[in-house]
Every structure is written in structure tokens, then in C-alpha cells.
Amino acid sequence: MTSTSTATPGVRPQAGLAWLVLSLACACQFMVILDASIVNVALPSVREDLGFTPTGLAWVVNGYLLTFAGFMLLGGRAADLFGPRRILAAGLSLFSAASLAGGLATSPEVLVAARVAQGVGAAMMAPATLAVINTFFTEPNARARAFGAWSASGGVGGMVGAVAGGAITTGLSWRWVFLVNVPIGAVLVVVAMTSPAGTRAGRRESLDLTGAVTGTTGLAALVYGVMQSADHGWTSLPVVAPVVAGLLLLFVFTVVESRLAVRPMVPLRLFRIRGVAVGNGMLLLFGGISIAMWYFTSLFLQNVLGYSALQAGLGQTPAAVVFVLIARLAAALLPRTGARPLAPAGSACFLAGFCWLAQAHTGTGYVTGVLGPTLLVAAGIGLTFPTLMAAATADVPEGDAGTIGGLAQTAGQVGGSIGLAVLAAVAGARAASEAGASSPAAALAAGYDLVFLVAAGLGLAIAVVSLLLPRHRRG
């Protein structure tokens, strides 16, 4: 009787604490992904209300993505140096304040500046959430479940954003797309500051300023140059100049980290961990898969089948649900199987789903031509994404958890940015070649079909690279 009564109180607080920590990490991930998707539907209303030019309007999206990708390595290192909880709370505060400024913006310049600040806040939040999971959930089964829930929360954020963006813009105003973040962020700041997650003080080391400047600027320049390819040719000066500058800066960053920095921002010794090196390489490839699935299937539904933005969001909802369910299943399997079987299984889904989707045309029905293949691809994403994130952040010392989280998120984000630019160029070139011989919708369908075939090839490449992952260590 005595032993039972003393053991029970010890279990419940720990279980409740784990639930609180995981809920905080998932809510922050949900918020970051929600914001990335919810804004797209509101862009026409934003342009009309604030008087954006077509080029300027793109920076409502690009301003966020540029700083999000560029500052994530710095955000991850800051989490290691100053503690994940502090950086998570600071990122939430900046993100919420920038959302308030965006919702109240009266000019294009203010809104773009707010979006840039939002990206910096998100770049602080995202790696800090992974650092919290890596340091708090150390038991393999619990850690795998935590990664599954974290991955699923991002899927839910994307699903809600696609649908809620249209509903909020239509029923209220585009301003509430931003203002909705303010009360949510305020609550999460309080939870973060009172949560014991990530309470360690950090290393109390000085920040590697040279590495921070060259790494952050190099990534931002590279992503900016790739983004410019949407409006300029790949060999044009607006594309080549920032891409070359970014690659040079990243080369300097590598030299600084390997030879000059006493305490490097990204210790290159981390890449001697096979899961880190292979997992991040696969996340680069996976970025193109994700873009092909969510971005180009939405364009197909709208530009080929004539769906509205809200209808397209609803049309993708079943796939998002499948992703969430399969991600939780993958998390349950991961401790028993390891990453090596799950990644090829996901790739098989990519290959089958995208090849099926590549048969779609103007006369395609939604159920047989879009729903079926997207459910297959979504199952592949559910199997692959949490698996790759777990592989890319496993076996890392606790003091480097933020850095490795930032590195993994940066790999996926840069892969998505490059994937979007390359796949958009592929789709545009194919559509242009078909323009004279078919209707505009049919020409666009031909371009999207080629994108889906390229994505199938990326899925095959992920399967091949996955063979390099370390073998699962049992018990």
C-alpha cells in the first residue's frame, strides 16, 4: 500500500510534464507552418487593399521565407548557447509582435518589414522546438512518439492554413490572417516561460560572429538568388550574382568553422555522425517532394480543374489527414525498425503516387485522378518526414541539440526553395512548348505532369541515399 501510494504521485507529474513540453513544441511548430500556408490565400485581398505591385506582392511571401531559411542556423546555435526556453520565448515574442504589425499595416513597406521580422522569429522558434524535444525526450520510444506528434502538428498547420486562410479572408478580413497569431503567441510565451523545458542555461560561450555573419548572409543570398529565377532566367545577372555570392560566403563559412573559429557556430564534427550527414542530404531532396505535393497539386486543382483557392484547400485536406495519421504510425514503428526500412517505403509511395498523378489532364476526375495519388504521396510523406528528422538529429550531444535542429530545418527549407524554383522552371518550359498545340489549361497540365515525374525521380533518389543510413541498433 505504501509503495503504491508513493509511486503513483511520482509518475503522474512526470507524464503531465512530458505532455506540457510536447504540447508547447507542437503548438510552436503548428504556428510556424500555419503562417507559411495561411497567407497565400489572402494575397489577392492584400494586393487590392494596400496597393501592392505584382513584384512587391511576392515579397509578402519571399520576405518571410528568406529570413526563415537564412537565420535558422543562427537560431539553433543561439538555443545551445542561451538555452532553448529563452530563445523559444524570444522567437514567439518577436513573431507575435511582427504579426500585430502586419495585421495593422497601412502600406506595403510596413507589411513586408513585418513579414521579414516574422521570418526571424520563426527561425528562432523552429530549431528551439527540436532542441526541446531532443533534450527532454531521451528514451527512444518516447522520442520517436514526440517526433511523430511534432511532424503531425506541422501537417495540421498546413491543412488548417489552406482552409482557414480562405474562410478568414472571406468572412472577416485579410488582417485577421496575421492578428490571429497575437493571442496564440501571447499564451505560448507564458507557457514557454513557465515550462521547465529547456531550462538549462546553455554553455555561456561567446557567439561565433564571423561564422554567424558568413553563414546567415550566405544562405540568405543563395535563397534570394534562387527566388529571383521565377522572374529572370537562370543565367541572368539577378540570379547568378546572388547565387555565386551566397556560395562563396558559404565556402568562407566552411573555412571559418573548420580552421579559424575557436567555438564554431556549426561544429563540422557533427557531420562525422552518419545519421546527421545522410539525414540532412535526404532532407534537401525531400524539400522538392513536399513542394511538388502541396504547391503544384494546388495549382493543378485551380488552374487546370478550375477550383477556387478554398476548394483547392478542401481538396487537399484528405491527403493532409492521411499524412498526420501515417506520421504517428511511423513514430510508433521507428524505435523498432529504425529509419532504413521506413524511408524506402515512403519512397515507394512517392514513386507510385507521383507517376499516377502525372497522368492527370483537363478531363481528369478529382477522385481517380487527384485524390487517389495524393493520398499515396501523403502516406509517403508521413513515413518519410518524421523518419528523416529523427535520423538527422539522432546521436547528437545535448549541447548541440539546437544547432543540429537548425541544420535539419535549414536543409529542408533550402531544399524546398531550390525545389520550387527548379520545378517552376520545368513546369513553365513544358507549358510554353505545349502552348501552340493545346488549350492554356492543357498546356499547364502538361507542365505540372512533368513536375510530378521529376518528383517521382526525387523519391527514387531518396530511396537510394537511404541505404547509407546507419543500421538500427536493437535493444
Image (spheres, rainbow, N blue to C red):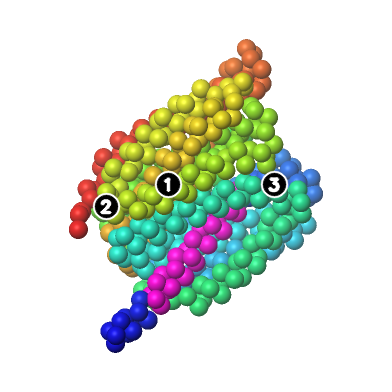
Q: Estimate the x, y position of residue 474 in percent, counting from the top left.
A: 20, 54
Marks 1,3: beta carbons within 8 A:
no
Circle 3 crowding by C-alpha within 10 Å: few under 14, some 14–19, many from 20? many
Q: Which residue is mark 1?
A: 326
Marks 1,2: beta carbons within 8 A:
no
Q: Name the amino acid, label 1.
A: Ile
Q: Give the number of the mark in front: 1 or 3.
A: 1
Q: Residue furthest bottom?
A: 2
Q: CA distance from mark 1 to mark 2?
A: 16 Å
Q: CA distance from mark 1 to mark 3?
A: 27 Å
Q: Which mark is residue 166?
A: 3
Q: Give the number of the mark in front: 3 or 2.
A: 2
Q: Which mark is residue 145?
A: none
**Mark 1: secondary structure:** helix
Q: Which secondary structure class fits the magenta region best?
A: helix
Q: Which residue is mark 2?
A: 336
